[in-house]
Image (cartoon, helix red, strand yellow):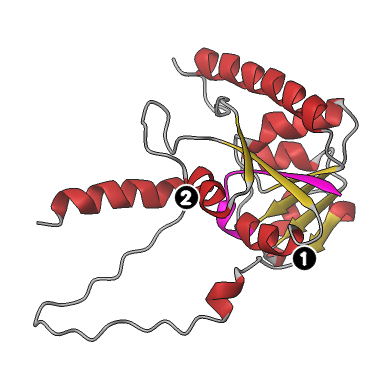
Amino acid sequence: MKIIITGGHFSPAFALIQRLQKNNEIVVIGRKYALEGEEAPSYEYRICQQFGIDFRPIRTGRLQRKLTTHTLPSLIRTVKGFSESIKLLKKEKPDVILTFGGYVALPVALAARTLNIPVLLHEQTLNAGLSAKIISKFAQKVMISFESSRKFFPKDKVVVTGNPIREEILNSSYSLPKNTSKAPIIYITGGSAGSHIINISIQKILP
């Protein structure tokens, strides 16, 4: 089976890829750069490069909840993203689209709908974003991590699956190195674009 995976929450997506790629062909569609206008590669692009996962970049716009000066340019980019997605899906011919939400997933899911390719949606967070709510209208199934997320989606489609976790996290034997200095240890963590911003900020203040 050929599966295309797309969406903004790539950590749980990668956990699933680790299992699925053993018996399936996996292609990831996503953003190549973490933030628009920057040259820093996105988390999903770096992981795919590192583990040899086929990656197809697209550029698309974010949905705007309010009318601003960014609304029209973002809408134009979204239309372009949909056009790119149509071309990609016609070329790749996947059996199913598995999306993990976010603005990148929307044009891919809409293109899949247009081409009659089944769409599955996984929502990792307590609150559903606008893209996920739209995708859920035509997705075959909606998988959620928390029971409280059920209210955002069509009830007859929802399945509570929990959040996929990478095998190395469950089987990790890593321990923090001993603190040989008197300086305190600071642990910093984050996710996706949020971690990118944190990394840049921390790098500046490290001295």
Asked if residue 175 is positioned above or below residue 107 in the image, the reply reads below
Residue 3 position within the rendered picture, expressed as x and y whole percent measured from the top left? 79, 46
Using the rendered image of the protein, determine whether residue 129 is visible from the camera's viewpoint: yes
How far apart in space, not on screen, are marks 2 and 1 (Cα)?
A: 23 Å
- Amino acid at dot 1: Val
SS at mark 2 in the image: helix
The answer to if 9 sits in the magenta stretch is: yes
State the image coordinates of residue 105 (x, y, percent, origin top left): 66, 37
Q: Nearer the viewer, residue 121 or 68?
A: 121
Looking at the image, which is closer to me, 60 or 174?
A: 174
Give left or right: position of 165 versus 137. Answer: left
Judged left or right of residue 204, residue 15 is right
Which residue lies most toward the front here?
A: 52
Q: Give the residue number, with chain letter if any, for mark 2.
A: 192
Q: Which residues are magenta?
A: 1-12
Residue in view at x 24 percent, y 71 percent = 186
At mark 1, the secondary structure is strand
| Image coords of residue 184 (percent x, y) | 16, 77
Residue at 44% from the left image edge and 15% from the top image edge: 69
Depth-wise, is mark 2 or mark 1 nearer the camera? 2
Whether residue 77 sits left or right of residue 2 in the image: it is left
Where residue 75 appears, as percent x and y from the top left, is: 59, 17
| Residue placed under numbered mark 1 in the picture | 160
Neighbor class of circle 1 (other Cα within 10 Å; few <14, some 14-19, many 20+) is some
Looking at marks 2 and 1 on the same chain, the residue that comes earlier in the sequence is marked by 1
